[in-house]
Image (spheres, rainbow, N blue to C red):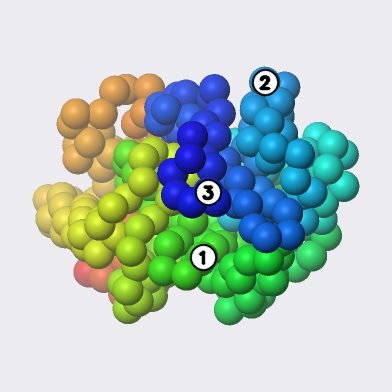
Amino acid sequence: MDIATGVRRIRAANPSPMTGTGTNTYVLHGADGAVVIDPGPALPDHLAAVLAAVQGAPVRAILVTHPHLDHSGLVPELQAATGAQVYGFGGALAGRSALMQRLAAAGLQGGGEGVDAGFVPDVLVADGAVLALAGLQIEALHTPGHMGGHLCFALGDALFSGDHVMGWASTLISPPDGDMSAYMASLRRLQAQHWRRFWPGHGETIADPTLRLAELAAHRHARETAICAALQAGPARPADLAAQLYTDTPPALLPAAARNILAHLIDLHDRNVVFSTEPLGAGAQFKII
């Protein structure tokens, strides 16, 4: 589907409660070839659809916002078919804060979001790098939060926002891969710039990025307030708080909700708003200070 001049969106057939209607892959056509952003999951039909969208142009680069399998799983097959180099911030552990590194070393594991542990980019992309590819100028913005190495890619005043800003739901933040403090800082960074539109990793085009960013920030602040209010009644663990606060969430999704709660609690702990007498982790009990 052409969503702008020279920009085509291909949606993978991987709908789920975590991906919405599916993962979005974008093909950008420039004066000297094409660039693919987020190849998507390793599905043969999706590979065929992406190659068809390239329309025979030489693929100059494969850009990856973050190494979750629904975004980067198709990289080996697409690279084999096109010979293009793969650009990314780093591997699955890249960009983690010192706190998340300490928690991981102490045994905190992710929530099973499909991390692509084997992802290794050919070209490491730093924050602020301007990539001259296929006759296009694409700026990389390091936006940690959903993952430590998450990148957004700016094409003028349009932004390919990956899973940092999605068009259908708020973002899962699951420590130690996810980091709530970093996520909120990345939101504030994007709010400081003017954007005409966002093209997200899931969902439809975001026509009013200013409104969407404000909605997401307000949602997180409201969730934090609700967590603190619930802890006023007594100590609780992330799973207990999720069951209490996510009253409209299907039971199958409560573990993911508990990971979001955990991310908030770790951030609040780091800011000395709550504390835990147990090692920080998914089963730790938290109290309000």
**Residue at disc 1, secondary structure:** strand
In the picture, the quarter occupied by the C terminus is bottom left
Kindly check if marks 2 and 1 are in contact, taking CB atoms under 8 A apart as contact: no
User: Which mark's residue is nearer the viewer, 3 or 2?
Assistant: 3
Circle number at residue 219: none
Q: Give the image location of residue 83, x and y in percent.
A: 87, 47
Between 43 and 135, the residue placed more toward the observer is 135
Label 3: few (<14), some (14–19) or many (≥20) C-alpha neighbours in 10 Å: some
**Residue 213 occupies quadrant:** bottom left
Between 83 and 190, the residue placed more toward the observer is 83
Disc 3 marks a residue whose amino acid type is Val
| Residue to which mark 3 is pinned | 7
Outermost front residue: 31
Seen at 67% across and 60% down, the residue is 31
Label 2: few (<14), some (14–19) or many (≥20) C-alpha neighbours in 10 Å: few
| Residue to which mark 2 is pinned | 45
User: Which mark's residue is nearer the viewer, 2 or 1?
Assistant: 1
Disc 1 marks a residue whose amino acid type is Leu
**Residue at disc 3, secondary structure:** strand
Label 1: few (<14), some (14–19) or many (≥20) C-alpha neighbours in 10 Å: some
Q: Is residue 39 above or below residue 96?
A: above
Disc 2 marks a residue whose amino acid type is Asp
Kindly check if marks 3 and 1 are in contact, taking CB atoms under 8 A apart as contact: yes
Q: CA distance from mark 3 to mark 1?
A: 10 Å
| Residue to which mark 1 is pinned | 155
Q: Is residue 81 above or below residue 6?
A: above
Q: CA distance from mark 2 to mark 1?
A: 28 Å
Which of the two discs, 3 and 2, labels the residue nearer the N terminus? 3
Which of the two discs, 2 and 1, labels the residue nearer the N terminus? 2
Between 53 and 61, the residue placed more toward the observer is 53
Q: Is residue 258 above or below residue 140?
A: above
Q: CA distance from mark 3 to mark 2?
A: 20 Å
